[in-house]
């Protein structure tokens, strides 16, 4: 394979350092830039025009999902591999709809990272093998008749809507607490009340609700 240039965009410095170390072991890959948020990623990609961008799905200032289209605009030749901790088919669908070329879970093996890079550099799409079944199941469930509609978000307070938005975007309880200047315990209380009000039984259902009600943009 020919030499490929790459930019890493993730708001966690340790994650970037770990990825850089892994990628430096690949003789055919050169890391030419790092970014801590979506806006910084766009700027670095515009200046370096890399072959590939590893883009975290959830970052401050501008999320990876929102940065995809702008990255493709400033550097059309760059392939984008989304990184996420979450196995939500909605995130995968939104990533590809926005123009991403691949989707990789952060707990994937090093060999799968290598496979993802090779696949994208060959001009093909890539999705983590662990996600294949969940994507198929999600598509199948959409065909099931008689599904009860979720309650609308009108029952939520403004603060609960804000907490819901941040959680659905992929932020942890601790990150939400820091962003809203409240305690993690308060975030957990809000989260429990949101789940109860909306009659949701899982975090995946919460994300689906936020997308359905356009509380988060995908």
Image (tube, rainbow, N blue to C red):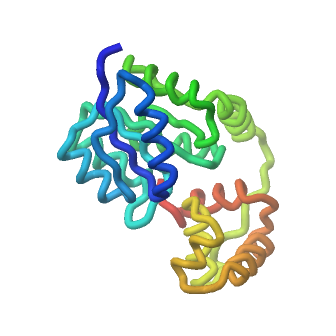
Q: Is residue 179 left or right of residue 5?
A: right
In the image: residue 123, left or right of residue 153: left
Q: Which one is in front, 160 or 117?
A: 117
Which quadrant does the N terminus fall into?
top left
Is residue 106 depicted above or below 11 in this figure?
above
Could you say where residue 78 lies in the image, as x and y percent from the top left? 29, 34
- Looking at the picture, tell me which residue is in the foreground, 191 or 145: 191
Number of labels in the image equals 0
Residue 30's image quarter?
Answer: top left
Q: Residue furthest top?
A: 1
* Above or below, comparing residue 129 to residue 107 in the picture: above
**Residue placed at 63% from the left, 48% from the top?**
86
Look at the picture and state if 7 lies above or below 101. below
State whether residue 55 is above or below residue 109. below
Query: Between 118 and 76, which is closer to the camera in this rendering?
Result: 118
Q: Position of residue 46 (x, y in %)?
A: 20, 46
Instruction: State the residue in front, 199 or 78.
Output: 78
**Quarter location, residue 29:** top left
x and y, in percent, of residue 18 in the image: 50, 44
Q: Residue furthest left?
A: 47
Q: Quadrant of residue 155?
A: bottom right
What residue is rendered at 58% in x and 43% in y? 106
The residue shown at (47%, 41%) is 19
Q: Residue at x 30, y 16 (%)?
A: 2
């Amino acid at each position: 394979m020919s030499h490929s240039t790459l930019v890493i965009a993730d708001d966690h410095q340790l994650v970037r350092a770990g990825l850089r170390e892994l990628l430096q072991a690949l003789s055919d890959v050169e890391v030419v830039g790092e970014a801590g948020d979506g806006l910084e990623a766009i700027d670095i990609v515009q200046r370096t025009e890399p072959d590939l961008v590893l883009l975290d799905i959830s970052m401050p200032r501008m999320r990876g999902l929102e940065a995809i289209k702008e990255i493709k605009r400033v550097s059309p030749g760059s392939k984008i591999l989304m990184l996420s901790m979450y196995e939500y088919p909605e995130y995968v669908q939104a990533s590809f709809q926005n123009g991403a070329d691949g989707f990789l879970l952060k707990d994937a093996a090093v060999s799968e990272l290598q496979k993802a890079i090779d696949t994208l550099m060959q001009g093909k799409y890539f999705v983590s093998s662990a996600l294949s079944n969940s994507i198929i199941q999600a598509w199948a469930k959409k065909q099931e008749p008689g599904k009860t509609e979720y309650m609308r978000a009108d029952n939520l307070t403004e603060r609960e809507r804000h907490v819901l938005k941040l959680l659905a975007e992929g932020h942890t309880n601790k990150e939400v607490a820091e962003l809203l200047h409240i305690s993690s315990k308060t975030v957990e209380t809000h989260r429990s009340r949101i789940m109860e009000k909306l009659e949701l039984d899982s975090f995946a259902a919460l994300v689906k609700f936020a997308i359905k009600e356009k509380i988060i943009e995908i």
